[in-house]
Image (cartoon, rainbow, N blue to C red):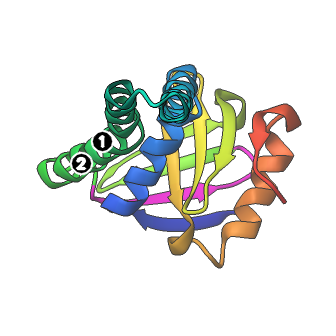
Amino acid sequence: MPVEVNVKMNVENMTDFMFYHIYSGSVGRITLGLGALNVGCVIAFIMKGDYLMTALFLLFALLILVAFPFYIRKKVAKQMADSDRLAVNVNYKFDEEGIETTIDSENGKAEWQMFKKAAATKKNIIIYDAEKRAVILPVDQIEEEKDAILELIRKHMPESAVKIRK
């Protein structure tokens, strides 16, 4: 039985997607590691009484752990405001064959084997294809259909590719 949903991205959902996309990759893990390392250095230099180095590493930690996420959030908001293509209604139809996407009068269908990874955050369900393009489904917009969509994803994608908790 096909499941059909209409979604429209907003700044909050797109920011959540970007945070997941960045921080689940190697660059994001390195960034978080550097932030943690800087926090460790702050603690070590406080204990040694070296307040100049404490201030320097505190500045680095704040840049990495606060300024970078703030920059991402601002960049996404600007991108959403400037782009006609990001904030449009998208219709997704999930069935046994794949996912059909319709935007305005354009549509296309992708078979399940094209999708390589499925993940979920608190706000989105994300399905990636081999080229790292994503189908982003805001959870707050698909509440009634969520279970049926997750069932199709689990049924048609390899278990190792589905990073969604039950």
Image quarter (top left, top right, bottom left or bottom right) of the C terminus: bottom right
Tag 2: amino acid: Arg
Within 10 Å of disc 2 (Cα), the crowding (few <14, some 14-19, many 20+) is: few
* Residue for point 69% across, 63% down: 2
Image quarter (top left, top right, bottom left or bottom right) of the N terminus: bottom right
* Span highlighted in magenta in the image: 87-97
Percent coordinates x, y for residue 156 in the rendering: 81, 42
User: In the drawing, does residue 35 fall left or right of residue 115?
Assistant: left
For residue 1, above or below residue 109: below
Residue furthest out toward the bottom:
144
Is residue 1 among what the camera can see?
no
Badge 1 is on which residue? 67
Percent coordinates x, y for residue 78 in the rendering: 16, 49
Within 10 Å of disc 1 (Cα), the crowding (few <14, some 14-19, many 20+) is: few
User: In the drawing, does residue 123 fall left or right of residue 149?
Assistant: left
Badge 2 is on which residue? 85
Percent coordinates x, y for residue 90 in the rendering: 40, 58
Tag 1: amino acid: Ala
Q: Nearer the viewer, residue 54 or 68?
A: 54
* Residue for point 61% across, 54% down: 121
Percent coordinates x, y for residue 94 in the rendering: 64, 55
Q: Which secondary structure lies at badge 1?
A: helix
Q: Is residue 88 magenta?
A: yes
